[in-house]
Amino acid sequence: MSTKIIHIDMDCFYAAVEIRDNPQLIGHPVAVGAAANKRGVLTTCNYEARKFGLHSAMPTARATKLCPKLILLPVNMEKYRQVSQDIHQIFRGYTEATEPLSLDEAYLDVSDSTECQGSATWLAQRIRSEIKTVTKLTASAGIAPNKFLAKVASDWNKPDGQFTISPDEVDTFIQTLLVRKIPGVGKVTAQKLHHQGIATCAELQELSNETLIELFGKFGNRLYDYCRGIDHRCVQSSRIRKSVSTEHTFLHNLTTLAQCEEKCHTLYDHLCRRLSKHDDRVIHKQFIKIKFADFKQTTKECVVVNLTRDTFITLLRDSVGSIDKAIRLLGVGVRFHDPEGNTFQQTLL
Ligand code: TTP
Ligand code: MG
């Protein structure tokens, strides 16, 4: 199965939060940062302000010269942290394989996801739409076979857009990609390359690994791979996996218990296949997740000793009863004993 990575990044994050909370700012150039008289810089600015050439880290004094009508707001980290928690929670609702990069950005490995019929492009759309519903803010996404390309792609249709690079498009895409678009290539590296007459990845491919290492040290190795569209880095979730689950959104809503039970069996088989990768873990609970046609969601779980198919059927029956609302999504999963918590319990016993 091919690797599918989504990189999600909020649009002009701090500024967007401020504008959301004060709609009078809509349509005006807005920046968040420290005042010019404190020799401050902008942390970010909205897209209206970017039209004047403003950007993150620009001294506020210069920014107000370029854009005299700029509305400058102070940084309010508490607020951004709150929104950040919300979006990272949304990401984890789709996969535990999420790697937060900053308050407003993360990588998601969705290779195993069966949602959206396995389409990472649709999944990214759904995640962005959920972000919009929950936070009233927009995000952009890149979908690609590795982290490097996903990150490049999330910038492609910013703001409020997304871009997919499928595995068979990588070679063509990379040829014309400008080296300065490669994450980690700043002004200095880009200039060094320009002096060698190199502006695109196709041109960068002409340099040997040795030459690149000579020029850029360890980063040279990375560049050698990146300009070929290669990146073997895994999405590194810092969390210990707490659960494994699988779910499916149906093309046609389910309206009878019999239909749900049948789908439950298929999901169970898929779950067992996924669990084979985690046979060192002890299962603590089984749960079922149900999303109704009106997008309301419910989960029901119970403590178990052994994983059984019948437990899911019981949970299903308990949750939906006689089904008075059509069902658009069903999911089944297990929660593991926390390996450390487990040891603690054993010593207590
Ligand atoms: P970014 O995602 O780099 O920028 P952004 O979200 O403002 O804009 P874009 O639409 O291009 O993604 O950074 C996220 C937030 O981090 C940003 O809103 C403010 C903060 N930040 C700083 O404080 N200093 C910086 O130098 C940068 C780049 C960002
Ligand atoms: Mg951003």
Image: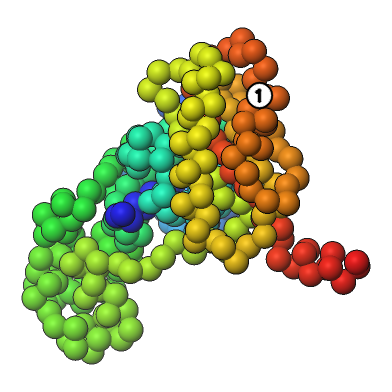
Residue 261 against residue 218 in the figure, above or below: above
From the viewer's side, name the closer residue of 312 and 219.
312
Q: Is mark 1 within 8 Å of ligand 2?
A: no
Residue 12 sits in which quadrant?
top left
From the viewer's side, name the closer residue of 59 and 85.
85
Horizontal side of 161 relative to 274 (left or right) equals: left
The quadrant the N terminus occupies is: bottom left
Specify whether residue 246 is in view: no
Q: Position of residue 90 (x, y in %)?
A: 56, 40
Q: Position of residue 34 (x, y in %)?
A: 58, 52
Horizontal side of 309 relative to 97 (left or right) equals: right
Extreme residue in the right direction:
348
Residue 310 against residue 187 in the figure, above or below: above
Which residue is rendered at x = 77% and y = 64% of the image?
Answer: 342
Q: Position of residue 24 (x, y in %)?
A: 54, 23
Which residue is denoted by mark 1 in the rendering?
Answer: 317
Residue 251 sits in which quadrant?
top left
Q: How is the image coloured?
A: rainbow
Which residue is rendered at x = 22% and y = 63% of the image?
Answer: 229
Q: Position of residue 336 (x, y in %)?
A: 67, 55
Residue 240 against residue 302 in the figure, above or below: below
Which residue is rendered at x = 44% and y = 29% of the image?
Answer: 249
Horizontal side of 295 relative to 316 (left or right) equals: left
Type of the residue with mark 1: Arg
Horizontal side of 186 relative to 299 (left or right) equals: left
Residue 94 against residue 211 in the figure, above or below: above
Pointer 1: residues within 10 angstroms few (<14), some, or many (20+)? some
Extreme residue in the top direction:
324
From the viewer's side, name the closer residue of 256 and 30.
256
Specify whether residue 200 is in view: yes
Which residue is rendered at x = 32% and y = 79% of the image?
Answer: 219
